[in-house]
Image (cartoon, rainbow, N blue to C red):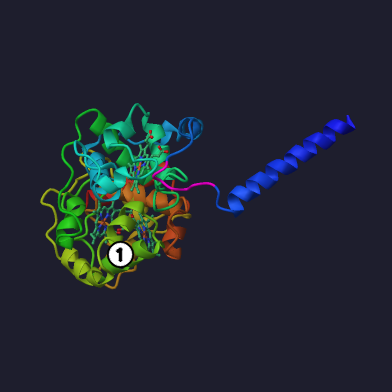
Amino acid sequence: MRRMIQTLAALALLGLLGAAAVVGLGLYNVSAQVGHMPGVSWVLHTTFRNSVKLRATSMEAAPDLSDPDLVALGAGHYATACAPCHASPGTDRSATMRAMNPVPPRIEEAIGDWAPNHLHWIVENGVKMSGMPAWPAAHRGDEVWAVVAYLVALREGTAGDLPTDGPEGEARAYCATCHGRVGGRVPRLDLQDPGYLAAQLRAYADGTRPSGIMAQAVSLVPKAAHAELAAYFASAEGPEDVSAATGADTAEGAELAQAGTREVPACAACHEGAEPRKGPVLDGQTRAFLDQQLRLWRDGTYAHDKLMSAAAQELTDDDIAALAAYYAGRR
Ligand code: HEC
Ligand code: HEC
Ligand code: HEC
């Protein structure tokens, strides 16, 4: 018995010394040109697939993935955030990307037969030690669904082309790939004053307002251009057909917005009336955006304004739906 323990201890020591030599003396070749030893790639990829399946996001949180506004938003993000590695659909990756190890698969192969919630997990979390990045904002799984909606549409052949106005051209045209097609979760900017818009761009850039989509967009234009972009979009023409909350009963929303309750302050106190107003204009803003933003404030994902955090604290899902419908339907 004692013999056996001694032998095992000796073997363990030898193993440790071996590992220390590999690490300390640089014996392991990290060259991406040399690939893995036989079997290692299989082990890593199988670990990856099973890890994703074990942890995948619940589909209960998924919005309607066939919503064209959501697909368009995902396409806008894909064009600058994913295409540099996975290429635009139907094209191949650059020679340099193909020299990565592991190689980023062409997007059609990357989507493969992954279920939507698996894709969601991969895009939100990234894959350690592989070059596949995580979503650039924490706790914004809600935004990741837009990219998933695009990937699912791509697999089904309904995705349409990617936007072609990139940040290397005129910045406004690039911003307009999303903000020119107002709808869904993309907010109207023409409602706000330039000071508010510029402050939001700063908050997205430094992460105090966490959004992976807008953090990516602002990181691609020089800081010096922010003020001019804010001025331009604040004076842009609004859409002719405001996303009216047709058919929605907005009486409950009106009551809450104008009078509030014991727990919820009246929104009108800060969001309506002439300048100086404490908060941004909500009248005529898109419904899906308002709904989304109120959840972010209530759930504590957004915390960059104490007054607004406090105002949203006690809102129920029904309150949020009613308020979003009410403000979206106003001029
Ligand atoms: C810097 C390069 C890079 C960027 C940018 C990138 N990826 Fe990846 N991605 C990779 C690599 C490398 C892998 C392969 C990981 C592996 O096989 O272990 C990968 C894997 C994936 C997979 C899983 C494919 C499989 O092996 O089954 C999906 C899906 C995916 N990426 C989607 C995206 C999306 C969507 C974006 C944009 C939000 C994105 N990627 C951005 C490099 C990148
Ligand atoms: C890929 C689509 C996309 C692109 C490109 C994009 N945006 Fe956005 N923008 C969004 C979305 C989605 C939001 C809402 C984000 C959130 O959850 O806070 C947003 C929010 C904003 C807001 C905050 C508005 C408010 O009422 O709070 C401003 C300001 C803004 N964007 C300006 C810009 C500018 C300027 C550019 C170009 C540099 C740009 N965006 C590019 C999608 C985009
Ligand atoms: C005490 C003032 C105050 C009250 C009351 C208040 N808000 Fe706000 N709200 C703000 C401020 C300030 C901001 C902007 C914070 C920032 O991003 O700088 C804001 C932001 C928002 C936004 C994000 C808009 C955008 O364009 O990004 C929404 C939506 C919103 N509030 C809805 C509401 C609703 C609905 C109520 C009523 C339940 C409400 N607020 C009550 C001050 C207030």
Asked whether mark 1 lies closer than 8 Å to ligand 2, one says: yes
Tell me the residue that label 1 is attached to: 201
Q: Quadrant of the C terminus?
A: bottom left
* Helix, strand or loop at mark 1: helix
Residue depicted at 39% across the width and 53% down the height: 136
Among the 4 quarters of the image, the one containing residue 194: bottom left
Residue depicted at 31% across the width and 56% down the height: 216
In the figure, 47 relative to 285: above or below?
Answer: above
Residue 144 shows up from this direction: yes
Taking depth in this image into account, of 289 and 88 the one nearest to the observer is 88
- Residue 320: % across, % down: 37, 46
Magenta residues (range): 28-34
Callout 1: few (<14), some (14-19), or many (20+) C-alpha neighbours within 10 Å? many
In the figure, 138 relative to 92: above or below?
Answer: below
Taking depth in this image into account, of 294 and 170 the one nearest to the observer is 170
Q: Quadrant of the N terminus?
A: top right
- Residue 145: % across, % down: 34, 40
Residue depicted at 23% across the width and 64% down the height: 192
